[in-house]
Image (cartoon, helix red, strand yellow):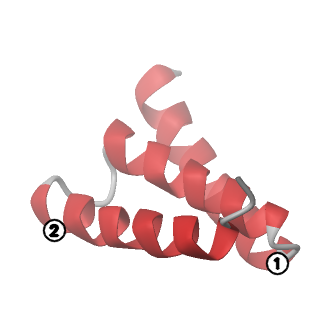
Amino acid sequence: MREVDWAIRCFWKAKDLREYSLGGDTLDTATVYNNLGCCFYFNQNFYSAHAFFKLSYEIYKKFLG
């Protein structure tokens, strides 16, 4: 629907809630990091997208092997 800025705000709030309740290194939080990476990629903010993709990849690698 091309509402990337709104999606970033929603996923950022979800990130804050999940980091507070579950911690920063869980699979659920990694999913939010990946979603934020996708949003920043579509917003053409490639450095932030890369950082979130790398963070989510490391968490996935830790839990899933």
Say left or right for 12 vs 51: left
Within-10-Å neighbours for mark 1: few <14, some 14–19, many 20+: few
Q: Which residue is mark 1?
A: 45
Examine the image and state in which quarter residue 4 appears. bottom right
Of residues 51 and 43, the one nearer the viewer is: 43
Name the outermost residue toward the front: 1
Q: Quadrant of residue 42?
A: bottom right
User: Is 22 situated above or below 50?
Assistant: above
- Looking at the picture, which amino acid does disc 2 mark? Tyr
Q: Secondary structure at mark 2?
A: helix
Q: Position of residue 39 (x, y in %)?
A: 68, 62
The reply to whether residue 51 is visible in this rendering is: no
Residue at image position (81%, 77%) is: 47
* Picture mark count: 2
Q: Residue 29: give x, y in percent of width and height.
A: 36, 50
Residue under label 2: 20
Q: Which residue is pictured at 86% across the width and 72% down the height?
A: 46
